[in-house]
Image (spheres, coloured by chain):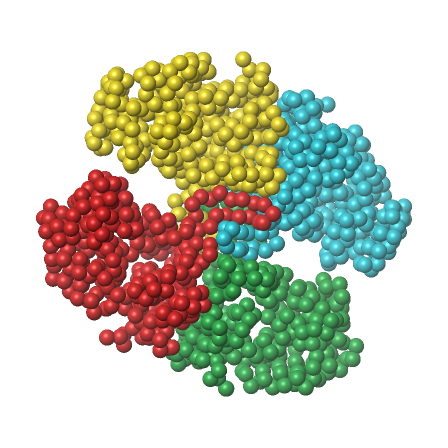
Chain colours: A yellow, B cyan, C green, D red
Amino acid sequence: MKLALIGAGRIGKVHAQAIHSHPDVTLAAVADHHQPAAQALAEQYGSRAVSVDDIFADSRIDAVLIASSTPTHAEYLERAARAGKAVLCEKPIALDLERTRDALQVLDDNPVVCALGFNRRHDPQLAALKQAIAQGRIGSLETLTIISRDPLPPPAEYVVESGGLFKDMMIHDLDMARWLLDEPIKSVFAVGSSIIDPAIGEAGDVDTAMVTLTTASGKLCQISNSRRACYGYDQRIEAFGSLGMLQAQNESDTRLRFTGEAGQVEEKPRWFFLERYAEAYRLEISDFVAAWKEGRPPLAGARDGLEALQLAEAAERSLREGRNILMDTLV
Amino acid sequence: MKLALIGAGRIGKVHAQAIHSHPDVTLAAVADHHQPAAQALAEQYGSRAVSVDDIFADSRIDAVLIASSTPTHAEYLERAARAGKAVLCEKPIALDLERTRDALQVLDDNPVVCALGFNRRHDPQLAALKQAIAQGRIGSLETLTIISRDPLPPPAEYVVESGGLFKDMMIHDLDMARWLLDEPIKSVFAVGSSIIDPAIGEAGDVDTAMVTLTTASGKLCQISNSRRACYGYDQRIEAFGSLGMLQAQNESDTRLRFTGEAGQVEEKPRWFFLERYAEAYRLEISDFVAAWKEGRPPLAGARDGLEALQLAEAAERSLREGRNILMDTLV
Amino acid sequence: MKLALIGAGRIGKVHAQAIHSHPDVTLAAVADHHQPAAQALAEQYGSRAVSVDDIFADSRIDAVLIASSTPTHAEYLERAARAGKAVLCEKPIALDLERTRDALQVLDDNPVVCALGFNRRHDPQLAALKQAIAQGRIGSLETLTIISRDPLPPPAEYVVESGGLFKDMMIHDLDMARWLLDEPIKSVFAVGSSIIDPAIGEAGDVDTAMVTLTTASGKLCQISNSRRACYGYDQRIEAFGSLGMLQAQNESDTRLRFTGEAGQVEEKPRWFFLERYAEAYRLEISDFVAAWKEGRPPLAGARDGLEALQLAEAAERSLREGRNILMDTLV
Amino acid sequence: MKLALIGAGRIGKVHAQAIHSHPDVTLAAVADHHQPAAQALAEQYGSRAVSVDDIFADSRIDAVLIASSTPTHAEYLERAARAGKAVLCEKPIALDLERTRDALQVLDDNPVVCALGFNRRHDPQLAALKQAIAQGRIGSLETLTIISRDPLPPPAEYVVESGGLFKDMMIHDLDMARWLLDEPIKSVFAVGSSIIDPAIGEAGDVDTAMVTLTTASGKLCQISNSRRACYGYDQRIEAFGSLGMLQAQNESDTRLRFTGEAGQVEEKPRWFFLERYAEAYRLEISDFVAAWKEGRPPLAGARDGLEALQLAEAAERSLREGRNILMDTLV
């Protein structure tokens, strides 16, 4: 696969490395609105820096990875689809439902393999959790508890442009909930506080939130988010069912254990998503390439982005209105 | 302390043993509406079987432990107060708020040391959790996650007379939430399902439930309950704050660990409350005796019973009406 | 059982409490060479202080628990046997083999139920380990690894009179090895150092030691001892076999876990033997009473004391002579 | 660095991948006595298959990685040194001391950067252990306990040609002991049994062994080896000192945890060295390249191979003669 990368920032670099280490993918080109960044990254991996227009015009390019800034995602996704190129797009497609639905319409009209960057679905531990549930290890799934905490809150100004806690951070947990519950969400209830950084509250967002989901068959799910965990990225999921419980636990760099006067001490969890989901980024590329080769849908697609965004919007509305939101009453 | 025990059933026996092993307490008398049961228990511990009326009439008896059936609690509590005897009453005082408030009024008019059987407050691990939070180990408490699962659902007929999941089972978790959050609860939201035993649903109750609490200062709390965990009694609390996280974990009989083809295996959690909270029952007696000696309030008192019952009622109403309940709007 | 206690010191008090809490045992008398100590302990448990001679002369006394100083053990053991009383004797019977063998001869001539205070055999976790091995959980046992560390070294003067590390401390581990390996020990090899407290070395003892045992069938065992672990009493055993591994792990007061900037922290192991083996002392009394009632040998008997002492002597000789000692070459 | 690989077998493939993923190394050539294997591996990574002679004759090649069969190591090592090429040689250099010493002499006469494949020194967890000891985390190191078990015994015929348990398997643990104890070994004592596979015993080797080391300053070390652990590769090290204990623990693929009727189950350890030390192989290449660039010795060098081999020979002699071997009495 000849793959072009749009976006040479932090996450673009992670993808470039994953692309490089994949035996069947060539990093065909790199584009960035800041041309020197594209240049530097292209050189590092023996590729070439081009413009975005060049990429869509180049018929030798099979696929595009969109890792540019959020407001550009939907447009590039549509251009890729219209150019007949497979596309792996960082989430979100857009921060509003209408723009997202428009992009999905273009994909419907121009069917290409389209993967969305819900990186957690590719994490080995979370994938093993999904598989174990699917194989009936815990019998019938009854409840799900998702705890997800960032190490540090973002600057308040980022909070606004990123879409706020529900669309920027909890959206990953909402996607996990959908993926693991594996049936339509019936209701969404949210509470939230701004108790970590007052500036976040002043910017109109919350830094601590809890959401409760129910499904049509009566499964229940709780999600707990915090923008600041002093010990690092806290990423745990507990699935409970008729035959037992599965717990995805935090990972640390090594399992070295110290016992001394302070107690029995194990390492902190990995610091943030780049450390925790390093392997997931590699496997995301693998799944994208395999889906493209086999003509099958990737593990997470554009529609998953829309569905998660709908839940995030419902959570926002629940918080705003102080009430439980029934999903089937949403337009 | 000369202590009389009313109720010689399962929980009465647990208390009798705890009383016997306490150096400063004498089991002065045992009463039970089934006289042979009182007789047998009295003999086992060198005490005597009497009638309930005898107990309240006997001026040598300092204190009464009420472990009889729930509908008798409020009356015996009031009689103990009027007789000027200290009282340790199994929870709940009553299943409705009005009856509970009446009993509290009698206690206000006849002040005696009155302890309520919220056994978990006496558990060494949960007490250590409370103390660590109070000492600032995690800085400012921000969120609380309580997971509480019984090993087996009760018979559906018991479900009704016991007051249902919220008043019979979750009431312990609501008390824990109040105790640890340590500030007024502002709102209560509940979801629930009957997905374990259809008979429980037919009896008008749920067997799986999740509740979200908020406090005035913006702390958030989630409680998750299930009536059936095939691996035993699941009793965990996670307190998260600005400086870290404290987790009360399940306890097992021993820490013997087996590693074989099936993986690395540790023992299941203790089976149910009698096994898990055996030590708590002993410490509950100790606290009661110490409170009586020192003239101080015990760790959990009658008002805690009323407050927890109000939260349970709010949760029931939330589930029934599908909406978030603000506590200050409750009469 | 009417039981008399000889010795009202630290370990005597532990036994007195265990006796008191046992429903079928009466603490009939307490003796101590320091009479006020006997008096105080007797009063605490509603017993009476007497002389040692009184105990052996009193035909109403069924059994004697010897918790006096080590040099008196053998004599009191023999007097108990001659008086036809069951006896539970703190280890060791004596610090030399000859005196121990003499006592065993008296027991052979005057057969009574005789239990020796190898407390660890009664610990729930170690008993579960023994049972799991016996039930074939790990198939054929092949190797054993015993790690045993005290929290603090004893004063150097105690080291000498107690018989030194091998007879005072490792003897418990040698007994564990015998009990779990369950076949004759073929060879003993020891190394040791005085690297914690120079005074211990000057007193002719070691404070750190490792021993290797082999059995006739080829099982191998390692024991590691240290007189000082800053984090508390370290008591672990690992049994490895054809079908897996069993690990007895350290126990702590609670399982409360803290996660913060310093890592994920669990409590230290319990501080020393009184904390770690509190339950074992209670179960030791139970086993003694049951053995007496049922006329069966107790879990650990006088011969186990002799056998463990022989291994300790072999270890001492190995260390002294720098060579492997074959047990069948010992007289 | 232009690096040539000799040996395209199992371990050669692991190295080829590690070379490929290193940004500063080019896989310049691949040789194997089985030419098609070299051809296939060369093609996979865009390299070329050549003869061993070609490699040593090619002045553009900076370095050689020797991953061919054991009997060829010493010769290729010497040829690399004489050709002035840096060399990373799989362990052992040779199975006998004399041949090893000859190779070291050639290296002395022809100084090149020479790394020996003691892969464990590069493992992140074991490196963190080493670093924590060096930083004084446990104060003064006093004892070391190394447990090392393979998942499956090798065929008895391999046992012989590989040099037997001590030279083939325990040599890694002996190197770890040297590295962590960080002072001369004074004595070696070994016991061993053939209790897993009788064919191994018939071939003159043991399948289960324990070794005790002492150092000049009085540190003590125990090593326990088994050729078969049904649950996978068991790789643990415990370092104990005046301020605490460090434990390197087994690693598993994920930390997913299941709790059900069978208990609380975590995954088995990784199956064998390729899984457990995958990261170590990558870091070994990194260290080799860095040492070559910086002109510093690599983390493990040829002399470490000689020293570990001397300890393995001493252990063999101890087992054979049933006695403790003092290292300074060895020629």
**Which quarter of the figure is the C terminus of chain A placed in?**
top right
Judge whether residue C141 can be spotted in this image: yes
The answer to whether B262 appears left or right of B205 in the picture is left
Where A29 falls versus B72 (above or below)?
above
Asked which quadrant contains residue B312, the reply is top right
Tell me what residue is drawn at x 85 percent, y 43 percent: B83
Tell me what residue is drawn at x 46 percent, y 37 percent: A126
Q: How many labels does the image show?
A: 0
Q: Nearer the viewer, residue B155 or B68?
A: B155
Q: Nearer the viewer, residue C294 or A303?
A: A303
Where D35 falls versus A180 (above or below)?
below
Tell me what residue is drawn at x 58 percent, y 61 percent: C132
Asked which quadrant contains residue D228, the reply is bottom left
Asked which quadrant contains residue D150, the reply is bottom left
**Which quarter of the figure is the N terminus of chain A placed in?**
top left
Q: Nearer the viewer, residue C11 or D254?
A: D254
